[in-house]
Image (cartoon, grey):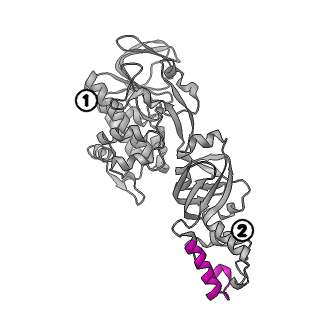
Amino acid sequence: MLDLPARHSPSEGGGLEQADVAIVGGGAAGIFAAICYAEKQPGRSICVLEKSSNLLSKVKISGGGRCNVTHACFDPHELVRSYPRGHKELLGAFHRFQPEDTVRWFARRNVKLKTEEDGRMFPVTDRSQTIIDCFETELRNHQVHIRYRADVKEVTPTGDGFNLRLADGVHIRCRQLLIAAGGHPTTSSYDYITRLGHSLHAPVPSLFTFNLPGDPILELQGVSSMVHIELMDAPFTSSGPLLITHWGMSGPAVLKLSAWAARYLHEKNYTFSFRIDWLPGTDAKELEAYVQTLFQHAGGRNAGQALELDLPKKLKHHLLLKAGIDPERRWAEIGKKQKLSLLHLLKSDTYTSKGKTTFKQEFVQCGGVALNEIDMTRMESKVVPGLYFAGEVLDIDAVTGGFNFQAAWTTAWIAAESMASDA
């Protein structure tokens, strides 16, 4: 739990409390919105309702404890390409608050970010606590009230605001309400939202790795290679680094594919086939001509040495064996059938995945409040006036790399701006 002043601790038992603004959720979106609103409307009472006993839990673990704050992609049209759900709706939002604005926001608070080779941005300290400390300072400065273990069970519009009933019997009355409750694995966690008249896309996992139980390729644990990967029975593809693990395949190429195909793979109960092009930069005909050249000019060399490809050695030997070729056998002794099999494997190696594994601790849900029920220029509900949404509670999710946090900052900032202008 953040070390906030005593007045930020929850009271116990039933009762009635009042606030100008109530924010459901003490994660990235909820806390960012609270701070941004407080800056625009100093002196207004803000109450953040956090279901657990800790704030900012995902911020704490993001990026292996370094906090992948955002991504160095400053063109909104390019940025939205990293969002399987929400890309159309976020375009206008990113024209108002994008990664460049995020960098400036933290810089004004003496938190400098750095960009790594893959575009991910982290605090220069490489510590997520730096981001949490920044937020904590802002919460203190603006006297934002935090109520922990505040499980919202019911929200009732009152005509001039809202009444929130918590599990412990406490009622919170507020004039404006922002729901930034994050992602949850079950729709029952959102019952108080659906009772308000909103519809939900059922939450299903996104950003997961592919399990290949018993496949011989598991012996190559730790090997990584650039690939193109596609599902066999659906139009989902991805390119980038692939990492072989002790349970299957991971890495950016797999994670991106899992995000874009999240709902399809859920419907398939995570049993599906996919193919890998191990040499995406090499045309199939060029590869065939190269193999034929080897037969003519390197027939005396063994297959493992003669076959010079842009592949890790272990992976190359694995594919040779899979094609029925002994890497120690002379290339001239390799039959046509084995060569054709090798060519096929290099450009279209197929696997069947059975099950999934969550990517580290960065569990992301696909699903949430339907975006056609939200005014994305204000983040306000079209169903209930005065009700706002931000963050993962919306049907917005992204590939790994800081994009999910950026969606949280952007939607929270817009919601705070709208609420402040209406106060």
Above or below 46: residue 271: below
Residue 24 in sight:
no
Residue 125 in sight:
yes
Precedes in sequence: disc 2 or disc 1? 1
Left or right of 322 in this view: 6:
left
Mark 2 = which residue?
322
> Which-is-in-front pick, marks 2 and 1?
2
**Residue 17 coordinates in the image, percent (x, y):** 40, 14
Cα–Cα gap, marks 2 and 1 = 63 Å
Which picture quadrant has residue 421?
Answer: top left
- Front residue of 134/214: it is 214
Above or below 162: residue 111: below
Residue located 57% across and 72% down the image: 285
Left or right of 89 in this view: 277:
right
Looking at the rendered structure, the secondary structure element under dot 1 is helix
Which picture quadrant has residue 36?
Answer: top left
Magenta stretch, overall SS: helix
- Front residue of 113/81: it is 81
Disc 2 residue type (three-letter): Lys
Left or right of 276 in this view: 374:
left
Q: Provide the residue span drawn in magenta.
A: 285-309
**Residue 366 coordinates in the image, percent (x, y):** 53, 38
Residue 40: mark in rendering: 1
Residue located 44% across and 37% down the image: 56
- Front residue of 393/239: it is 239
Residue 296 falls inside the magenta stretch: yes
Q: Residue farthest to the front?
A: 285
**Residue 376 coordinates in the image, percent (x, y):** 37, 32
